[in-house]
Image (cartoon, rainbow, N blue to C red):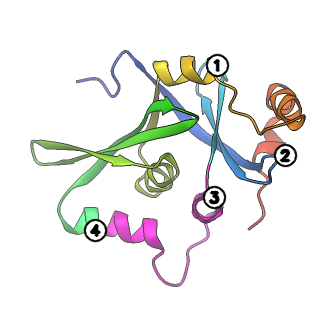
Amino acid sequence: MSDASQDELRMEVRGLMLDPGSNVPIVILRDLESQLFLPIWIGAYEANAIAQKMEGIEPPRPMTHDLLKSLVDHLGAVVDKVVITDLQDNTFFALIQLSRGEQVYQVDARPSDALALALRAEVSIFVRRIVLDKAKAADLTAEGNDSEKLKKWLEEVNAEELGKWTM
């Protein structure tokens, strides 16, 4: 069995940024081969959870995503992968794929939670191609004049800028 079906593209968390119009955190996913970027707007808590893991910061007590990973482990299951599955009305959807023995489970999740867990479980992140098609067709940027600013920034961003995030 292959790691991803034909309709999924493997991506990585490239970095975090703030939407210049709304100051809402955005996690940036990048296709490993074509360098295609997919921005997903997320909450501040999830952005901090992702940033902590990316920066190697270990909290003194388990945070929510650490707890979730621990529960999966203690139940004898493994996180296989996460998949960004859909985009409807500017809202992204995701699945966490788990397995325990021969049994495979797919759990509905917010993309931000799925990504934070994927980083902790060190598993692959996939995006269905239909999501990329929908994202291209939709205006995913902030309302008003700053939408063009964000689009231009994503087109011109260099790798160093994407990694900068302050908690």
Label 2 sits on what residue type?
Gly
Q: 47 or 139: nearer the eye? A: 139
The disc, 2 or 4, on the residue closer to the chain's N-terminal end is 2
Q: CA distance from mark 1 to mark 3?
A: 23 Å
Q: CA distance from mark 4 to mark 1?
A: 37 Å
Q: CA distance from mark 1 to mark 2?
A: 19 Å
Select label 2 or label 4 by which is in front: 2
| Residue under numbered circle 3 | 47
Q: Which mark identifies residue 71? A: 4
Label 4 sits on what residue type?
Leu
In the image, residue 55 above or below residue 100: below
**Tag 2 secondary structure:** loop
| Residue under numbered circle 2 | 21
Label 3 sits on what residue type?
Ala
At label 4, counting other C-alpha atoms closer than 10 Å, the crowd grade (few under 14, some 14-19, many 20 or more) is: few
Confirm or deny contact between disc 2 and disc 3 (CB under 8 A).
Answer: no
Select label 4 or label 3 by which is in front: 3
Q: CA distance from mark 2 to mark 3?
A: 17 Å
| Residue under numbered circle 1 | 136
Q: CA distance from mark 2 to mark 4?
A: 38 Å
Q: CA distance from mark 4 to mark 3?
A: 22 Å
In the image, residue 3 above or below residue 70: above
Q: Quadrant of the N terminus?
A: top left
Q: 24 or 62: nearer the eye? A: 24
The disc, 4 or 1, on the residue closer to the chain's N-terminal end is 4
Label 1 sits on what residue type?
Lys
**Tag 4 secondary structure:** helix
